Amino acid sequence: MLQSLRGRLIIGVISLVVVGLVISDIATYAALRNSLISQLDDQLKTGHNAAISGLGGPNEGGGPPSGSSLPAGTVIELVSPTGTVLIAKSLAFPGSTPSTAAPVIPQPFPAATEKSPAIVTLTGTGGVPQFRTAMWPEDFFQGNEVVLAIPMTAMLSTLNQLIQLEALISLGVVVATAIIALLIIRLGLRPLEKMGAVAQDIAAGDLSRRVEPATGKTEIGRLGLALNGMLSQIESAFAERTASNSRLRRFVADASHELRTPLTSIRGYSEMLRRGAAESPADADLARRRIEEESIRMTGLVDDMLVLARLDQGRPLDQEPVDLQAIATDAVADARAVAPQREIKLVSPGPVVVNGDDTRLRQVLGNLVRNALVHTPSQTPIDVKLSTEDSIARLSVADHGPGLPAEDADRIFEPFYRADPSRSRDSGGAGLGLSIVSAVVTAHGGRVSVHQTEGGGATFEVHLPLAGT
């Protein structure tokens, strides 16, 4: 029980209640006892003349008649200095038998005077356990000690009843507190129990579960909000890890497939040379040319994969002012040199400066223009446009070819994905160009998208933050 939160809370609440009741009971008992003793002391003080009168002395000072203010059972004694009781009287109600109980007189007597009697509690005999007693020497009785003792039986009975009543009340309060605390704690901890059940489901693999309650109005509700936020992050992290692992496996498989083709060609032509292609100059020239071409293509493929790997690792890029207009001008000039029969236009409002890596940004625009050259008919025009809007540089490359189906547009930036799988690798590449475009643009804090060109074709649009923003 001590190991559970419910048990510790119940024990803590009951302990506090018990301590509070004990302190309250002791304080009540002490206050009542002091009050009753004070009343007895007042009776002893006002019974001075009654005691002297009861022993046969004069009623001085107009005090009350004999015994009129004193309770039944009050003992009045005259005691010699040696402790001998010379006179003893006990007050009784009319018609009742006087009590034989008497206080046990101590020796020596307590220090006292007639004006300042000694008031003490003495043990009693005759069935009376204690007497509240006033003692003083009286000159009228030749210095003998006058003893006025009121039995404390009624007071002790009242205190005993108080103790019994306090015990019963305290027991009832403790039991009621335990029951109410158990109910309240059980209701209060029920949300935590629900959270525990949900946590078990989540530990079993169901990351879509969420804890309840989740509200900012209560402490447990705020805990639920925090846990749900943490669970959402964990679920996202797991989903991202799963997607990343899936992409990695697909990347490795695709890379292996892409590298196998040139390696197979190189191996085949190498075997051709070994088997005697030297006897045929034409075959030897073909083998050497194809080995060189496949080596160059494989080198480019490896370089592209290294670029993607570095960008995926988050390696920092150069951050220098770069004029996109100059890059676009060079890319258009290169494209016109490669395809002089095409109409390739550049529209730019003037210099458009961004912070970035000049080499990688040239690679972005070069890949986009090459993609338009490779995947459209030879007479199809290409439009390159630069503009700025709300501190954003917008670079678009639009072609007027057959365009992209919707399912290809969603995957066009994945590594090794080719919208036209029938296209040969020699003409269509390995499918890494647009992946590099997306990775480079993202590393520069921008984004790239593709949509249909008005009138037909595909438009690739790059958004990059302008320098100084």
Image (cartoon, rainbow, N blue to C red):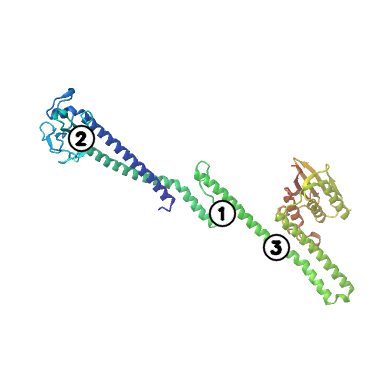
Mark 3 = which residue?
A: 252
**Which residue is rendered at x = 45% and y = 48% of the image?**
190
Q: Is mark 2 on a helix, strand or loop?
A: strand
Q: Determine whether the residue tagged by mark 3 lies in a helix, strand or loop.
A: helix
**Mark 2 → mark 1, Cα distance in angstroms:** 83 Å
Q: What residue type is labelled 2?
A: Thr
Q: Earlier in the sequence, mark 3 or mark 1?
A: 1
Answer with left or right where residue 19 lies relative to residue 211: left
Sequence-wise, the earlier of marks 2 and 3 is 2
Q: Which amino acid does label 1 sit on?
A: Leu
Q: Name the residue under label 1.
A: 207
Vertical comparison of 425 with 385: above or below: below
Q: Give the residue drawn at x 87%, y 52%.
A: 336
- Label 3 CA crowd tier, 10 Å (few <14, some 14–19, many 20+): few
The vertical placement of 269 against 96, above or below, is below
Q: Residue under circle 2?
A: 133
Which image quarter: residue 49?
top left
Locate residue 168, reporting x and y percent: 29, 43
Work out whether residue 402 can be spotted: no
